[in-house]
Image (cartoon, rainbow, N blue to C red):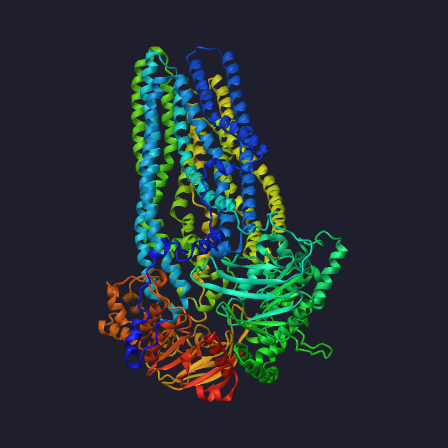
Amino acid sequence: MAPIQPAADKENALTKLDSKVVSIGDQEEADPFAHLPAHEKEILKKQIHTPDVKVGYFTLYRYATKWDIVIFVVSCICTIAAGAAMPLMTVVFGNLTGMFANYFNNVISYKQFLHELTHTVLYFIYLAVGEFVTVYISTVGFIYVGEHCTQKIRENYLRAMLRQNVAFFDKLGAGEITTRITADTNTIQDGISEKFGLTLNAFATFIAAFVIAFVKYWKLTLILTSTVFAIVFSMGFGSTFVVNWTARSQQEYAMGGTVAEEVLSSIRNATAFNTQEKLARQYDGFLQKAEKWGRKLQYALGTMIATMMTIVYLNYALTFWQGSRYLVKGELTVSHLLTILFSVMIGAFSLGNVAPNMKAFTSAVAAGRKIFAAIERDSPINPESEDGDKPATFEGVIELRHVKHIYPSRPEVVVMEDVNLLIPAGKQTALVGASGSGKSTIVGMVERFYDPVGGEVLLDGRNIQTLNVRWLRQHISLVQQEPVLFSVTIYENIRYGLLGTEFEHAAPEKQRQMIEDAARMANAHDFIVALPEGYETNVGDRGFLLSGGQKQRVAIARAVVSDPRILLLDEATSALDTKSEGVVQAALDRAAEGRTTIVIAHRLSTIRHADNIVVMQQGRIIEQGKHDELLDSKGAYYNLVEAQRIAAQVAGDEAAVEEEEAEVLPESAELGPTISRKKSQNYEEDPDDADPAGRLRRIQSGKSLSSLQLEKRQPEKQPEYSLWQLLGVVWSFNKSEWYLMVLGFFFSAVAGAANPIQAILFSRALQSLSLPPPRYGKLRHDINFWSGMYVILAASQFISMAGQAWAFGYCSERLIHRARNQAFRTMLRQDIAYFDADINSAGSLTSFLSTSVTHLAGLSGPTLGTILMVSTTLVIALTISLVTGWKLALVCIATIPILLACGFLRFWMLARFQQRSKRVYEQSAGFACEATSAIRTVASLTREGDVWEKYHSQLDRQAHASLISVLWSSSLYAMSQSFVFLCIALGFWYGGTLIAKREYSLQDFYLVFISLVFGAQSAGTIFSFAPDMGKAKHAAAELKALFDRVPAIDSWSQEGEALDHVEGHIEFRDVHFRYPSRPEQPVLRGLNFSVKPGQYVALVGASGCGKSTSIALLERFYDPLAGGVFVDGKEISKLRINDYRRFLALVSQEPTLYQGTIRDNVLLGADREGVPEEEIERACRDANIYEFIVSLPEGFNTICGSKGALLSGGQKQRIAIARALLRNPKILLLDEATSALDSESEKVVQAALDAAAKGRTTIAVAHRLSTIQKADVIYVIDGGRVVEEGNHGELLAKKGRYAELVTMQSLERGA
């Protein structure tokens, strides 16, 4: 800390303090332990170090069993066979064509023809059966092996997590384990299941196709290989642009998303300063750039797909043109020519299927690296290991010798320094002191959550590092401040205390007896039995169906059920209100008898009878002894007790207030039965126990019997919309582009016509190729003509496909931009209550903007264009074929639904496989996360094995269910692959019989057959490209609901009385308020106070008493349920809201800065354009930050970083004050403006605030009372009403609640 200078230098000192710029870059690389001696560094590093592991693709299969490997190999063989089936079909197809040509040229007789026809068509059926069997086996096999290996990875990962030491978790974010066990393992499963099979399948198809083609005739195949290079080159070349532009578009959007997230997470600030419009414009700036790159991306994609289709038609032209020359030379037959044509096409396209899967493989390996690193990690304090002694008996004497401790996650702070402490067996030792003095650290040392960097912890004279970790923890029970219950029954929760003890496998009757005895000892038995299901009541997620006091007593029962020798109570009652505390304390006193007990307490009344009281301060022990001895020595303990004695007096007065309140508020009777005192007990009953079943009902139904006002309010209903309404929403964003949409539809129709036209060209070309040798001159002439037609078709296809993609791409990017922009603006319009709801957290709203809105494209142009294209294809195909040959057409039309279904199912099932694997594991992931987030509780109960067993059995159940669903869905997928062969077989067989009777020419047959069968197949495939309509519908419904929601306090509204000036007279009249998100919790219960213009008023009180709520009501973030807030005698809800907020400025505890320069951030305060430079300068001088800004190299143009990360807390806070002053507000609201700062910055900021408050009405909420001693009036608030008022001197003289707060704080400062 800087030394305090004499008064003359004070000004300079203020500017010097807190003027360091925080530089973020350097901190990352440096070794956080560099400043420590080598042996300490070693101990800390060991506790958090994670090894780097090398992971290759096949490492992901490391947990495969022998069976898995067998299944995997069989699946590989099957998938290769299935891949080869498609090219084999081309051989059969070619042979049939050759046969038809021979028949027409009278080479074979009618009988021979029918015999060969039946024989060849049977090959199709064999292929269909083979394809079905191999696809089915390989799909099931790969998915099974993938799931099995992933399940093993999940289990090993959880086991690894459960054996890690606690320090390892201090570094992990809570979400990280969840992400690993859900998202990352899903990524691995995606990479090692059916995707691997598909890739192998595609390679097999490619190789088989080219082998067949080269065998048939190598010269033509070699020439056609050029199309493969053309396709690969155009895809490769196109995708470089696609990747580049996708990245750019995403990067711009990510910056926009950051802005959105910053704004939504600090929505109160944006609302208070009326900056919604400015911030929405800033967001829109990023959207415009993102749209620009997005459009380029759509153009590139469209051109790429169009190029591919063009190459296909050019390939036909080349084959017929070059093939006909070989045919005339007699080097090639028609059947070979067709086989080669189709083989090359199938081979080329199968390569295209490999690329998308490659990404899945690389992602899987990357995810595997993180997971395997955790699995490989050796935990320095491993509860699973059998190492270490397990003494048969022990006393329970705990001793700390010269212990020095540093938390590995905060290496710069020494938490304990040279602590020596003896805790005798069977006695109660209490630890007291200010927070951060090292009390809880001692508990962590005894449980061996951490190893000290110096000294040793002994149990009965043995260093606990030599003892077995699990044995040690089984003999110690811990009750924490925040009790963690698991979401099972109360009975199970208490039974967890028996794990690892000799009673774990005792008879159920014996266990039930022990559990009930423990519950009685913990004063919990009576309330449990009163619940409708008694001990079998499920406590809900994290135990939320029980009240705090009830949870804590269940936790105590769990701790004492195994009759441990050592009991650790870490502030076990501090989170409770006074009423529950009495009951819990009585339970703890009973539990502690006859055991070694370490108690940590904030409330000193609870430890008066301890055998030894240890007072700690800043990591050292400053005095110890019995209660009376310590009082006599008048040291630190005496001061702590004094402070709390004042509290006790005030609490006595409170009881009287409570009595009176029961009469004032009819609602309090509904909130809980009145407290009956039983004379036989020496503590009050917990009010929650009087009617636990009723409380449970209230919680489960979600309606507490809350105040009458709230009951009148209707809950928001989720509206239902029809498909037309939703289409209307989507189309409204594209109204101005209607001409482009029409153009897009026109091009779609043209593109759809290509397939049937191709059938005409194909059948004509085949007719020409089948001419007998005498007419070879005509053959060459005709083929040249038809090849030319193919080139023209290719060109028209390129124009129509690209045109459609460009038109719709432009429209859909505009659509997404406008929808995002409007959604964001509508979000900013909502009132604060909207953002309090859990489902509207900043994170979920941001992800709605980034992901859901993009799904809208599924109901707009591109999808409808696709549908139009498919319809055109089918309609033209049907017309042509019915006109040409109705008999065959009708038979082929019968197969269309099957072919469409196959095309659609193939892609739909693949998408289903992926979604299913994600869904299946959500539940078990939830279980794993519950356990790992409560790792200290799990560790202290030695529940690791139990958690793992449960997780394992959950996964087993899910794997079983999942296998059944895979067996069923794989059959659909296999059908979609194999039924195509059957449809072709039917067409050929029936068509062949018609040809045999000479009813159809070769040309008629091929025209009908190709246009219908191939048309339907391609139509089915196109279906799958359509963006997901289901998601689109869902997104549109969410958007419409958002657009339709009109908030109660509407910042767009122009209603209410206009306001042109404000004096600054404020009055709260009997204000009652509850937060809409927590209606069962009364916050303000009849708050009355008034502020005169120009006064500096402070609101103080314990946290949760309603100080900040008063500020929120004054900003009109909420409206009170009863009573009113008046400014200058007008009720604020009657005023025009934006006019009113213009006269207020808010400086909150966490200063909110946005990305951008310091100037941008200061300017957000002004709700007018063109603020002169001198005003900005004056605001900054008043806020004591001007010198600092000018000293920066960039001055006012310095970038603040995301959420202002590049500035220190004090600097951010002063910029926030400058922003508030720029508004020149009449009323200045300070919500704990300095509480988050260290003492150096606090002085500077406080000086700025004092200057800012001059000449304005100021209301300050403060935790640190030193900051508001100069206030004109101080209101002490407690339980939602004012309990004392006056200035600093008057209130101290009263020796009431305020005096208690002052004494407490001076103690903590002294500490």
Q: Quadrant of residue 243?
A: top left
Q: Is residue 192 above or below residue 383?
A: above
Query: Quick one: 1278 or 224, which is closer to the camera?
Result: 1278
Q: Quadrant of the N terminus?
A: bottom left
Query: Quick one: 630 or 1266, which is closer to the camera?
Result: 630
| Image x and y of residue 415, in percent | 48, 64
Query: Quick one: 370 or 1036, which is closer to the camera?
Result: 370
Q: How many marks?
A: 0
| Image x and y of residue 652, in percent | 60, 83
The residue positioned 30% from the left and 75% from the top of the image is 13
The residue positioned 54% from the left and 67% from the top of the image is 439
- Residue 856 in sight in this render: yes
Q: Quadrant of residue 330?
A: top left
The residue positioned 58% from the left and 49% from the top of the image is 924
Q: Is residue 572 above or below residue 1279?
A: above
| Image x and y of residue 895, in percent | 51, 31
Q: Is residue 194 left or right of residue 592?
A: left
| Image x and y of residue 282, in percent | 32, 61
Q: Is residue 444 above or below residue 1241?
A: above
Q: Is residue 1114 above or below residue 788?
A: below
